[in-house]
Image (spheres, grey):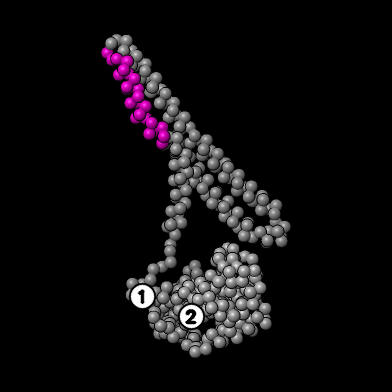
Amino acid sequence: MRWITRRTGPLFKERQRNMGELNGFIEETLSGQRIIKAFSQEERVITGFRERNTRIMLSGYWAQAISGFIPKLMNGLNNLSFAIVAGVGGLLAIRGLVTVGIIIAFAEYARQFTRPLNDLANQWNTLLSAIAGAERVFEVLDEETEARDEGAAVKLQHVEGAVKFSGVSFSYDGGADTLQDISFEAKPGEMIALVGPTGAGKTTLIGLLSRFYDPSIGSITLDGRELSTITRESLRSHMAFVLQDSFLFKGTIRDNIRYGRLDASDEEVEEAAKLANAHAFIMRLQGGYDRMLSVDGSGISQGQKQLLAIARAILANPSMLVLDEATSSIDTVTEIKIQEGLQALMKG
Protein backbone atom coordinates (compact mmCIF):
# COMPACT_ATOMS: atom_id res chain seq x y z
CA MET A 1 0.00 0.00 0.00
CA ARG A 2 2.89 2.35 0.75
CA TRP A 3 4.44 1.61 -2.67
CA ILE A 4 1.14 2.34 -4.42
CA THR A 5 0.36 5.43 -2.32
CA ARG A 6 3.64 7.08 -3.28
CA ARG A 7 2.53 6.91 -6.90
CA THR A 8 -1.20 7.57 -6.60
CA GLY A 9 -1.03 10.42 -4.03
CA PRO A 10 0.49 12.98 -6.46
CA LEU A 11 -1.96 11.85 -9.16
CA PHE A 12 -4.99 12.44 -6.91
CA LYS A 13 -3.61 15.87 -5.99
CA GLU A 14 -3.11 16.70 -9.65
CA ARG A 15 -6.66 15.58 -10.40
CA GLN A 16 -8.02 17.89 -7.68
CA ARG A 17 -5.99 20.81 -9.08
CA ASN A 18 -7.26 20.05 -12.58
CA MET A 19 -10.82 19.82 -11.26
CA GLY A 20 -10.49 23.23 -9.60
CA GLU A 21 -9.07 24.70 -12.79
CA LEU A 22 -11.94 23.26 -14.85
CA ASN A 23 -14.59 24.53 -12.42
CA GLY A 24 -13.01 28.00 -12.51
CA PHE A 25 -12.97 27.90 -16.31
CA ILE A 26 -16.66 26.91 -16.42
CA GLU A 27 -17.61 29.65 -13.95
CA GLU A 28 -15.70 32.24 -15.99
CA THR A 29 -17.26 31.00 -19.23
CA LEU A 30 -20.81 31.20 -17.89
CA SER A 31 -20.22 34.68 -16.42
CA GLY A 32 -18.73 35.94 -19.68
CA GLN A 33 -21.19 34.22 -22.00
CA ARG A 34 -22.23 37.42 -23.80
CA ILE A 35 -18.63 38.49 -24.45
CA ILE A 36 -17.78 35.03 -25.80
CA LYS A 37 -20.76 35.20 -28.17
CA ALA A 38 -20.08 38.81 -29.16
CA PHE A 39 -16.48 38.03 -30.17
CA SER A 40 -17.33 34.59 -31.69
CA GLN A 41 -14.92 32.75 -29.39
CA GLU A 42 -17.08 29.63 -28.90
CA GLU A 43 -14.61 27.27 -30.57
CA ARG A 44 -11.70 28.54 -28.48
CA VAL A 45 -13.72 28.07 -25.30
CA ILE A 46 -14.80 24.55 -26.31
CA THR A 47 -11.18 23.66 -27.10
CA GLY A 48 -10.06 25.02 -23.72
CA PHE A 49 -12.73 22.95 -21.96
CA ARG A 50 -11.68 19.77 -23.78
CA GLU A 51 -8.01 20.31 -22.90
CA ARG A 52 -8.80 20.74 -19.20
CA ASN A 53 -11.25 17.84 -19.24
CA THR A 54 -8.63 15.58 -20.83
CA ARG A 55 -6.11 16.47 -18.11
CA ILE A 56 -8.63 15.46 -15.44
CA MET A 57 -9.38 12.23 -17.27
CA LEU A 58 -5.71 11.22 -17.59
CA SER A 59 -4.73 12.02 -13.99
CA GLY A 60 -7.91 10.36 -12.66
CA TYR A 61 -7.50 7.31 -14.90
CA TRP A 62 -3.98 6.50 -13.74
CA ALA A 63 -4.76 7.27 -10.11
CA GLN A 64 -7.75 4.92 -10.13
CA ALA A 65 -5.97 2.25 -12.17
CA ILE A 66 -2.92 2.05 -9.89
CA SER A 67 -4.84 2.34 -6.60
CA GLY A 68 -7.33 -0.24 -7.88
CA PHE A 69 -4.66 -2.91 -7.33
CA ILE A 70 -4.90 -2.53 -3.53
CA PRO A 71 -8.25 -4.32 -2.90
CA LYS A 72 -7.29 -7.04 -5.41
CA LEU A 73 -3.98 -7.63 -3.64
CA MET A 74 -5.70 -7.72 -0.25
CA ASN A 75 -8.27 -10.23 -1.47
CA GLY A 76 -5.50 -12.31 -2.96
CA LEU A 77 -3.54 -12.27 0.31
CA ASN A 78 -6.67 -13.21 2.28
CA ASN A 79 -7.36 -16.17 0.00
CA LEU A 80 -3.72 -17.21 0.23
CA SER A 81 -3.78 -17.04 4.05
CA PHE A 82 -6.97 -19.13 4.10
CA ALA A 83 -5.31 -21.70 1.86
CA ILE A 84 -2.23 -21.83 4.12
CA VAL A 85 -4.37 -22.22 7.27
CA ALA A 86 -6.45 -24.94 5.63
CA GLY A 87 -3.39 -26.75 4.26
CA VAL A 88 -1.25 -26.64 7.41
CA GLY A 89 -4.29 -27.34 9.60
CA GLY A 90 -5.18 -30.33 7.42
CA LEU A 91 -1.70 -31.83 7.87
CA LEU A 92 -1.89 -31.27 11.65
CA ALA A 93 -5.37 -32.83 11.76
CA ILE A 94 -4.13 -35.93 9.87
CA ARG A 95 -1.40 -36.33 12.49
CA GLY A 96 -3.99 -35.95 15.25
CA LEU A 97 -2.46 -32.79 16.71
CA VAL A 98 -5.59 -30.62 16.22
CA THR A 99 -9.25 -31.16 15.48
CA VAL A 100 -11.14 -29.96 12.43
CA GLY A 101 -13.19 -27.63 14.66
CA ILE A 102 -10.01 -25.81 15.77
CA ILE A 103 -8.98 -25.34 12.13
CA ILE A 104 -12.40 -23.88 11.23
CA ALA A 105 -12.34 -21.55 14.27
CA PHE A 106 -8.80 -20.42 13.47
CA ALA A 107 -9.71 -19.72 9.84
CA GLU A 108 -12.78 -17.73 10.93
CA TYR A 109 -10.73 -15.69 13.43
CA ALA A 110 -8.19 -14.96 10.69
CA ARG A 111 -11.00 -13.66 8.45
CA GLN A 112 -12.40 -11.52 11.27
CA PHE A 113 -8.93 -10.08 11.83
CA THR A 114 -8.42 -9.13 8.19
CA ARG A 115 -11.96 -7.88 7.47
CA PRO A 116 -11.28 -4.26 8.65
CA LEU A 117 -8.14 -4.26 6.52
CA ASN A 118 -10.22 -5.40 3.55
CA ASP A 119 -12.77 -2.64 4.17
CA LEU A 120 -9.95 -0.08 4.38
CA ALA A 121 -8.39 -1.39 1.17
CA ASN A 122 -11.73 -1.18 -0.66
CA GLN A 123 -12.14 2.44 0.47
CA TRP A 124 -8.51 3.37 -0.16
CA ASN A 125 -9.24 5.18 -3.43
CA THR A 126 -11.88 7.33 -1.76
CA LEU A 127 -9.58 8.00 1.18
CA LEU A 128 -6.68 9.13 -1.03
CA SER A 129 -9.00 11.35 -3.08
CA ALA A 130 -10.44 12.86 0.12
CA ILE A 131 -6.94 13.62 1.47
CA ALA A 132 -6.04 15.37 -1.79
CA GLY A 133 -9.28 17.38 -1.62
CA ALA A 134 -8.66 18.23 2.04
CA GLU A 135 -5.28 19.74 1.14
CA ARG A 136 -7.06 22.08 -1.28
CA VAL A 137 -9.56 23.03 1.42
CA PHE A 138 -6.79 23.77 3.93
CA GLU A 139 -5.03 25.96 1.35
CA VAL A 140 -8.14 28.17 1.40
CA LEU A 141 -8.44 28.03 5.21
CA ASP A 142 -4.78 29.03 5.54
CA GLU A 143 -5.25 32.16 3.42
CA GLU A 144 -4.64 35.34 5.41
CA THR A 145 -7.81 36.96 6.71
CA GLU A 146 -8.36 40.68 7.14
CA ALA A 147 -6.03 41.98 9.83
CA ARG A 148 -7.51 42.05 13.31
CA ASP A 149 -8.27 45.33 15.02
CA GLU A 150 -5.52 46.65 17.25
CA GLY A 151 -5.93 45.83 20.92
CA ALA A 152 -6.64 49.44 21.92
CA ALA A 153 -9.07 50.13 19.03
CA VAL A 154 -12.34 51.72 20.15
CA LYS A 155 -15.89 51.85 18.81
CA LEU A 156 -17.17 55.22 17.61
CA GLN A 157 -20.52 56.27 19.02
CA HIS A 158 -20.81 59.55 17.13
CA VAL A 159 -19.03 60.88 14.04
CA GLU A 160 -18.80 64.48 12.86
CA GLY A 161 -17.07 63.50 9.63
CA ALA A 162 -13.79 65.45 9.68
CA VAL A 163 -11.45 63.37 7.49
CA LYS A 164 -7.78 64.26 7.05
CA PHE A 165 -5.14 62.60 4.87
CA SER A 166 -1.60 63.62 5.85
CA GLY A 167 1.30 62.66 3.54
CA VAL A 168 -0.31 59.33 2.61
CA SER A 169 1.56 56.97 0.29
CA PHE A 170 0.43 53.45 -0.59
CA SER A 171 1.62 50.50 -2.68
CA TYR A 172 -0.33 47.30 -3.34
CA ASP A 173 2.68 45.05 -3.87
CA GLY A 174 5.44 46.87 -2.02
CA GLY A 175 6.84 48.21 -5.33
CA ALA A 176 5.88 51.42 -7.10
CA ASP A 177 3.52 53.64 -5.13
CA THR A 178 -0.07 53.82 -6.36
CA LEU A 179 -0.51 56.93 -4.19
CA GLN A 180 2.31 59.26 -3.25
CA ASP A 181 2.27 61.97 -0.56
CA ILE A 182 -1.50 62.66 -0.68
CA SER A 183 -2.75 65.32 1.72
CA PHE A 184 -6.23 66.84 1.91
CA GLU A 185 -8.95 67.58 4.45
CA ALA A 186 -12.72 67.10 4.32
CA LYS A 187 -14.58 69.06 6.97
CA PRO A 188 -18.02 68.09 8.34
CA GLY A 189 -20.76 69.10 5.91
CA GLU A 190 -18.37 69.48 2.97
CA MET A 191 -18.53 67.62 -0.31
CA ILE A 192 -15.06 66.75 -1.60
CA ALA A 193 -14.55 65.62 -5.20
CA LEU A 194 -11.46 63.72 -6.31
CA VAL A 195 -10.81 64.04 -10.03
CA GLY A 196 -8.18 62.22 -12.08
CA PRO A 197 -7.56 59.87 -14.99
CA THR A 198 -8.13 56.13 -14.85
CA GLY A 199 -5.54 54.53 -12.58
CA ALA A 200 -4.82 57.73 -10.65
CA GLY A 201 -5.82 56.06 -7.37
CA LYS A 202 -9.32 57.43 -6.67
CA THR A 203 -10.76 54.04 -5.71
CA THR A 204 -7.60 53.25 -3.73
CA LEU A 205 -8.28 56.32 -1.56
CA ILE A 206 -11.72 54.89 -0.76
CA GLY A 207 -10.12 51.55 0.15
CA LEU A 208 -7.78 53.36 2.55
CA LEU A 209 -10.57 55.44 4.08
CA SER A 210 -12.64 52.31 4.79
CA ARG A 211 -9.51 50.44 6.03
CA PHE A 212 -9.58 47.66 3.48
CA TYR A 213 -5.92 48.71 3.26
CA ASP A 214 -3.61 50.66 5.53
CA PRO A 215 -1.28 53.37 4.17
CA SER A 216 2.43 52.54 3.75
CA ILE A 217 3.41 56.05 4.89
CA GLY A 218 1.43 58.89 6.45
CA SER A 219 -1.75 58.96 8.48
CA ILE A 220 -5.52 59.19 8.03
CA THR A 221 -7.64 60.62 10.82
CA LEU A 222 -11.38 60.82 11.46
CA ASP A 223 -12.47 63.55 13.88
CA GLY A 224 -8.83 63.83 14.93
CA ARG A 225 -8.49 60.11 15.73
CA GLU A 226 -6.16 57.80 13.77
CA LEU A 227 -8.14 55.21 11.79
CA SER A 228 -5.90 52.47 13.20
CA THR A 229 -7.31 53.24 16.68
CA ILE A 230 -10.92 52.67 15.49
CA THR A 231 -12.47 49.23 15.02
CA ARG A 232 -13.17 48.48 11.36
CA GLU A 233 -16.80 47.54 12.01
CA SER A 234 -17.44 50.76 13.88
CA LEU A 235 -15.71 52.86 11.20
CA ARG A 236 -17.65 51.30 8.33
CA SER A 237 -20.97 51.52 10.19
CA HIS A 238 -20.72 55.32 9.91
CA MET A 239 -20.12 55.18 6.13
CA ALA A 240 -22.25 54.28 3.14
CA PHE A 241 -20.70 53.33 -0.18
CA VAL A 242 -21.98 53.47 -3.75
CA LEU A 243 -19.37 51.89 -6.00
CA GLN A 244 -18.94 51.68 -9.76
CA ASP A 245 -19.92 48.03 -9.82
CA SER A 246 -23.20 47.98 -7.92
CA PHE A 247 -23.65 44.56 -6.34
CA LEU A 248 -27.16 43.34 -5.55
CA PHE A 249 -28.02 40.21 -3.62
CA LYS A 250 -30.51 37.54 -4.57
CA GLY A 251 -33.82 38.66 -3.11
CA THR A 252 -36.49 41.31 -3.49
CA ILE A 253 -35.78 44.91 -4.46
CA ARG A 254 -37.12 45.96 -1.05
CA ASP A 255 -34.63 43.67 0.75
CA ASN A 256 -31.73 44.96 -1.35
CA ILE A 257 -32.51 48.59 -0.45
CA ARG A 258 -33.12 47.67 3.19
CA TYR A 259 -29.61 46.20 3.34
CA GLY A 260 -28.48 49.75 4.13
CA ARG A 261 -30.44 49.68 7.41
CA LEU A 262 -32.10 46.40 8.34
CA ASP A 263 -34.61 47.90 10.80
CA ALA A 264 -36.02 50.37 8.25
CA SER A 265 -39.76 50.33 7.62
CA ASP A 266 -41.33 49.85 4.18
CA GLU A 267 -42.21 53.55 4.10
CA GLU A 268 -38.57 54.52 4.76
CA VAL A 269 -37.41 52.15 2.01
CA GLU A 270 -39.78 53.74 -0.48
CA GLU A 271 -38.81 57.26 0.60
CA ALA A 272 -35.12 56.41 0.01
CA ALA A 273 -36.02 55.03 -3.43
CA LYS A 274 -37.84 58.26 -4.27
CA LEU A 275 -34.82 60.36 -3.24
CA ALA A 276 -32.63 58.15 -5.47
CA ASN A 277 -35.13 58.55 -8.33
CA ALA A 278 -35.62 54.76 -8.38
CA HIS A 279 -39.28 54.65 -7.28
CA ALA A 280 -40.70 55.24 -10.77
CA PHE A 281 -38.86 52.37 -12.49
CA ILE A 282 -39.50 50.02 -9.52
CA MET A 283 -43.26 50.57 -9.80
CA ARG A 284 -43.09 49.77 -13.52
CA LEU A 285 -41.59 46.35 -12.77
CA GLN A 286 -43.86 43.38 -12.25
CA GLY A 287 -44.19 42.96 -8.48
CA GLY A 288 -42.79 46.42 -7.73
CA TYR A 289 -40.73 46.43 -4.53
CA ASP A 290 -41.38 42.70 -4.11
CA ARG A 291 -39.85 41.85 -7.48
CA MET A 292 -37.32 39.04 -6.99
CA LEU A 293 -33.82 39.64 -8.33
CA SER A 294 -31.48 36.80 -9.21
CA VAL A 295 -27.81 36.68 -8.22
CA ASP A 296 -26.03 40.02 -8.81
CA GLY A 297 -29.33 41.61 -9.78
CA SER A 298 -29.50 40.26 -13.32
CA GLY A 299 -32.80 41.16 -14.95
CA ILE A 300 -32.46 44.94 -14.55
CA SER A 301 -30.09 47.36 -16.26
CA GLN A 302 -26.75 48.53 -14.89
CA GLY A 303 -28.15 52.03 -14.43
CA GLN A 304 -31.10 50.68 -12.44
CA LYS A 305 -28.68 48.71 -10.24
CA GLN A 306 -26.84 51.94 -9.47
CA LEU A 307 -30.10 53.67 -8.56
CA LEU A 308 -30.89 50.86 -6.09
CA ALA A 309 -27.35 51.09 -4.66
CA ILE A 310 -27.81 54.84 -4.17
CA ALA A 311 -31.19 54.24 -2.49
CA ARG A 312 -29.49 51.72 -0.19
CA ALA A 313 -26.85 54.31 0.78
CA ILE A 314 -29.50 57.01 1.33
CA LEU A 315 -31.48 54.67 3.60
CA ALA A 316 -28.36 54.03 5.71
CA ASN A 317 -28.25 57.80 6.38
CA PRO A 318 -24.54 57.69 7.27
CA SER A 319 -22.22 60.31 8.71
CA MET A 320 -20.09 59.94 5.57
CA LEU A 321 -21.31 59.13 2.08
CA VAL A 322 -18.70 57.80 -0.36
CA LEU A 323 -19.50 57.70 -4.07
CA ASP A 324 -17.09 56.00 -6.47
CA GLU A 325 -18.30 57.11 -9.91
CA ALA A 326 -21.72 56.11 -8.62
CA THR A 327 -23.63 57.65 -11.54
CA SER A 328 -21.42 56.38 -14.36
CA SER A 329 -24.23 54.20 -15.81
CA ILE A 330 -27.05 56.73 -15.39
CA ASP A 331 -28.37 59.21 -17.94
CA THR A 332 -27.76 62.92 -17.41
CA VAL A 333 -31.37 63.88 -16.53
CA THR A 334 -31.62 61.15 -13.87
CA GLU A 335 -28.19 62.11 -12.54
CA ILE A 336 -29.31 65.70 -11.99
CA LYS A 337 -32.37 64.46 -10.06
CA ILE A 338 -30.21 62.14 -7.95
CA GLN A 339 -27.86 65.00 -7.14
CA GLU A 340 -30.85 67.04 -5.97
CA GLY A 341 -31.84 64.14 -3.72
CA LEU A 342 -28.30 63.84 -2.34
CA GLN A 343 -28.20 67.59 -1.66
CA ALA A 344 -31.40 67.24 0.36
CA LEU A 345 -29.95 64.24 2.19
CA MET A 346 -26.71 66.04 3.09
CA LYS A 347 -28.31 69.12 4.63
CA GLY A 348 -26.77 69.61 8.07
Q: Say which element carries label 1.
A: loop
Q: Is residue 238 left or right of residue 38?
A: left
Quadrant placement of the N terminus: top left
Q: Can residue 27 be seen?
A: yes
| Nearer to the camera, 279 or 67 | 279
Q: Is 143 in front, or is 30?
A: 30
Q: Main secondary structure of the magenta part?
A: helix
- Amino acid carrying label 2: it is Pro
- Numbered disc in front, either 1 or 2: 2
Query: Is residue 104 on the magenta stretch?
Result: yes
Up the image or down, 210 lies above or below 11; here it is below
Residue 195 visible within the image = no
Identity of the residue drawn at 60% across and 44% down: 54
Q: CA distance from mark 1 to mark 2?
A: 21 Å
In the rendered image, residue 257, in percent from the top left (x then y), is placed at 54, 73
- Tell me residue 242's x, y (percent): 55, 75
- Please tell me how crowded label 2 is: few (under 14), some (14-19), or many (20+) other residues with Cα within 10 Å: many
Mark 1 Cα shell of 10 Å, populated few (<14), some (14-19), many (≥20): some
Q: Residue at x 34, y 16 (%)?
A: 88
Residue at the outermost top position: 95
Residue visible at 52% across and 86% down in the picture: 346
Identified at 56% across, 64% down, the residue is 250
Which disc number belongs to residue 318?
A: 2
Which mark is drawn over residue 153?
Answer: 1
The residue segment tinted magenta is 97-120
Q: In which quarter of the view is residue 27 placed?
A: bottom right
Along the viewing direction, whichever of 175 and 122 lies nearer the viewer: 122
Helix, strand or loop status at disc 2: loop
Q: Residue 132: image x %, image y %?
A: 46, 46
